[in-house]
Amino acid sequence: MGTLSYDTNFKADFDDRVLAHLQIVIGAKLRRGESFHFSWKNEQSVGHGRTTVWLHPTVPLVYSYLGSRPPAINRQWVEALMTSANSVAGLQIVPEPADVPVAEPAAPLGEPAGLLTGAALPAAASEKPAVRAAR
């Protein structure tokens, strides 16, 4: 379970795999200087409601992962999340598409795997996602 910390006084826990995909989408939007809403359903432990935050490029944002290895990135999921982020409602966690190839992180182990550099951003819709063999 990883943690998203925003503006030094707000923290939310997400599965490392979800958090890695969110980092790609949020990073792409903020890198372009775009502000937007991000909403999710709360876990039962904090109530059954929803939380929404307004993400802005000037507000500090930290992604902390429990695991030491970056998860494989599902390009179709990134595209679905980006579509959500570009909607009027803002970014919402949509279910990961089932039975689709996933691409391994592009960087060697111990490096950010392009999550902050944009190397793992989705390919054009007409391209098939690249699948890299496990090491």
Image: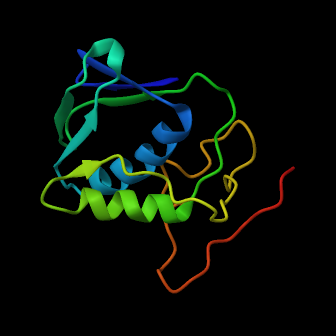
Q: How is the image coloured?
A: rainbow
Q: Say if 120 sits above or below 67 in the image.
A: below
Residue 70 quadrant: top right
Q: How many marks?
A: 0
Q: Is residue 87 left or right of residue 20?
A: left
Foreground pick, 68 / 114: 68
Residue at (51% x, 65% y) in the render? 76
Residue at (21% x, 55% y) in the render? 33
Residue 10 quadrant: top left
Residue at (67% x, 65% y) in the render? 101
Foreground pick, 57 / 54: 54
Q: Say if 92 sits above or below 133 in the image.
A: above
Q: Is residue 61 left or right of residue 69?
A: left
Q: Is residue 75 left or right of residue 57?
A: right
Residue at (28% x, 37% y) in the render? 40
Residue 1 point in image, percent of width and height = 52, 23
Residue 29 point in image, percent of width and height = 29, 55
Give the farthest residue toward the right: 135
Q: Say if 87 sits above or below 109 in the image.
A: below
Residue 108 point in image, percent of width and height = 75, 47
Residue 45 point in image, percent of width and height = 35, 13
Foreground pick, 96 / 83: 96
